[in-house]
Image: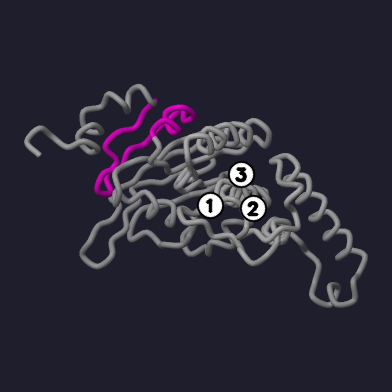
């Protein structure tokens, strides 16, 4: 089995006359924790949207587990092993914490509608498995006592954690985290760093994340790509990225500016 999970080759996308991402190349191998950073508007979330099937690239090739992803909708890519969170929290806020997890896990059930209507043994066994799995995840992340609370009533940091849990409930091989620390205070961000590290160690999941908090990125990512105006200007370990003149210019500008 190849260690390569995801590979993109010269992936570009334009909207009308605007090129948002140009010739983006990335190879993600099993077990990696990679950061994707860049100034606002650099094209980071657009990359995530292409990787997860929300957008179709104008040109280039995206392969997951060796197979092309063009034309495959996000729900099918999720079943194949790509899951994500969003920059703006998108929980089912009127549902319980538990139901948010159960819905995510439900994509792997195989019973039919008639079996659900008559409450067949196969349906009941699969639903029991989902319930056990949901409680196990909630317990691991210290949310078990809040299982029956309305998700939208959780503190902000716990809502972020629940969104990550919901992504894990889909049994992914690759998780894309879009600014998981957005809106968090220092204490919450530190707890998030520990959570991401724990997820990787506990579940063996490969992680690609977008983040503006440089302390978080430099503290947990082994490899970092930097985008600026849709173009990759640097790739390497945190030390290399921090000292790269193009990265410094992209974030801080030049003396002439």
SS assignment at label 2: helix
Neighbor class of circle 1 (other Cα within 10 Å; few <14, some 14-19, many 20+) is: many
Q: Nearer the viewer, residue 192 or 48?
A: 192
Relative side of 35 to 226, left or right: right
What is the spatial separation of the Cα atoms under label 1 and label 3, in whole angstroms? Answer: 14 Å
> For mark 3, what is the residue?
173
Q: Write the residue at 72% across / 61% down.
A: 99
Pointers 1 and 2 in contact (CB under 8 A)? yes
Q: Horizontal and vertical percent for residue 133?
A: 78, 49
Task: Give the residues in magenta.
Answer: 214-237
Quarter of the rendering containing residue 38 = top left
Q: Horizontal and vertical percent for residue 58?
A: 33, 61
| Dot in front, 1 or 3 | 1
SS assignment at label 3: loop
Quadrant of the rendering where the C terminus is positioned = top left
> For mark 1, what is the residue?
85
Quadrant of the rendering where the N terminus is positioned = top right
| Dot in front, 3 or 2 | 2
Neighbor class of circle 2 (other Cα within 10 Å; few <14, some 14-19, many 20+) is: many
Q: Is residue 248 above or below residue 26?
A: above
Q: Write the residue at 35% across / 51% down.
A: 11
Relative side of 92 to 41, left or right: right
**Mark 1 or 2, nearer chain start:** 1
What is the spatial separation of the Cα atoms under label 1 and label 2, in whole angstroms? Answer: 9 Å
Q: Write the residue at 21% across / 36% down.
A: 252
Return the mark for residue 166: 2
Q: Is residue 7 above or below residue 12?
A: above
């Amino acid at each position: 089995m190849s260690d390569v999970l995801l590979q993109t080759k010269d992936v570009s996308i334009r909207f009308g006359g605007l090129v948002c991402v140009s010739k983006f190349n990335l190879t993600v191998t099993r077990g990696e924790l990679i950061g994707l950073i860049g100034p606002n508007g650099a094209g980071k979330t657009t990359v995530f949207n292409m990787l997860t099937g929300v957008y179709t690239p104008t040109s280039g090739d995206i392969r997951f587990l060796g197979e092309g992803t063009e034309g495959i909708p996000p729900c099918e890519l999720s079943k194949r092993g790509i899951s994500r969170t969003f920059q703006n929290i998108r929980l089912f806020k009127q549902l319980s914490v538990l139901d948010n997890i159960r819905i995510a896990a439900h994509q792997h059930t195989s019973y039919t509608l008639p079996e659900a209507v008559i409450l067949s043994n196969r349906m009941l066994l699969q639903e029991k498995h989902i319930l056990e799995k949901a409680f196990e995840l909630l317990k691991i992340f210290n949310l078990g006592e809040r299982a029956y609370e309305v998700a939208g009533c959780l503190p902000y940091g716990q809502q972020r954690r629940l969104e990550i849990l919901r992504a894990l409930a889909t049994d992914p091989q690759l998780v894309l985290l879009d600014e998981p620390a957005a809106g968090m205070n220092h204490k919450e961000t530190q707890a998030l760093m520990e959570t991401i590290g724990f997820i990787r160690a506990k579940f063996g999941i490969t992680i690609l994340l977008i983040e503006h908090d440089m302390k978080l990125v430099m503290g947990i990512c082994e490899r970092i790509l930097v985008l600026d105006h849709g173009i990759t200007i640097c790739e390497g370990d945190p030390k290399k990225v921090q000292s790269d003149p193009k990265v410094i210019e992209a974030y801080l500008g030049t003396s002439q500016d």
